[in-house]
Amino acid sequence: MPELPEVETSVRLLKQKVLGKTFVCIWSEKKDPSLQSLVGRTITDVERIGKGIFFHLDNNTFLFTHLKMTGHFLLGEWELKECPLTKTKDWWSKEEIMQDKRNGYLRFVFLLDDNRQLSLSDLRKFADIRILGKKEKENYAQNIGPDALKIKEEEFRRLFKKRKPVKSLLLEQRIISGIGNIYVSEILFKAGVRPTKRADSISRKKIEEIYYYMQEVLRKAISLKGDSTSDFRLIDGKKAGYQNHHLVYNRKNKECFVCKSPIKRCMVAGRGSYYCPACQH
DNA sequence: AGTTGTGTTGAAGA
DNA sequence: ATCTTCAACACAAC
């Protein structure tokens, strides 16, 4: 579920580990030559734009990754093992990273010049990974809304002229970038607003509260290095921490921590939405 | 054992 | 226009 905090965490960890490293060779699960031009390129920076990750390369191009639902980066040392019976290929790690089943879906493995491997694990194969030019990177940045952690309150208030459910509004990356299904539930619970509430019917005071809790929830999630409810893992394969702090997400029929009402689940914008029927209006 | 739900996004349909 | 549904894929849980 990589959302802003997971992507931000990934970028921070990648910056610590792969800055200045050069690609030596590239393996991909499918015979895919599209990334072979990375060989010999050095990583000069790693940047988050919305939920996108951009590795800056030394030839003025960028390796772009969108993790989508189950993608995450791992750094370690692997050996490729071929299973003669199933004809599948498997990766074996000396570092216990693979003991977590969620880490066992390596789709791309990049050998770096420090003899370690940067890899992309992605169970559902939805992740997007390709090389972009400067122009394409700028297009990406222009086609998404302001970052949820950088938007000013005044601009945030202006978003609420739309007459759609507040949850749909906050999830739409073209309007505001970074929030996904987990954090939107947590933010709206803290603000006391139902996910179905139409954005243009929310008072200025409530919008300001949503703004405040949006910062609070996202910052707290970053400090816990993200959420490993699903497949997201840190670059060493270990779990992040936010999944132990959910107030409503994934808590259907459990007691609200504030009022003890059972948490409800409904569908908004086609997504499972959790809320407290007593605390949220 | 078959059905349902899961995180993201874009495209297609109503 | 704006909403919902589906599709990409694989698996867990029921």
Image (cartoon, coloured by chain):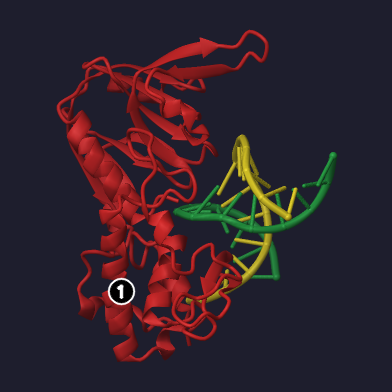
Chain colours: A red, B green, C yellow
Q: Position of residue C2 (x, y in %)?
A: 51, 76
Q: Chain of mark 1?
A: A
**Residue that sits furthest to the top in the current view:** A84
Which residue is nearer to you in this view: A132 or A217? Answer: A217
* Left or right, residue A133 beside residue A257: left
- Examine the image and state in which quarter residue A174 appears: bottom left
Give the residue displayed 54% in from the left and 69% down from the top.
A273
Give the residue displayed 51% in from the left and 11% down from the top.
A81
Rendered view: A90 above or below A225: above
Could you say whether the residue bearing mark 1 is in a helix, strand or loop? helix
Q: Position of residue A183 (x, y in %)?
A: 40, 64
Rendered view: A243 above or below A273: above
Give the residue pinned by disc 1.
A213
Rendered view: B9 above or below A154: above
Residue A136 seen in this snapshot: no
Which residue is nearer to you in this view: A119 or A161? Answer: A119
* Amino acid tagged 1: Tyr
- Examine the image and state in which quarter residue A39 appears: top left
- Examine the image and state in which quarter residue A214 appears: bottom left
Q: Position of residue A83 (x, y in %)?
A: 60, 11
Which residue is nearer to you in this view: A205 or A60? Answer: A205
Question: Dot 1, crowdedness within 10 Å: few (<14), some or many (≥20)?
Answer: some
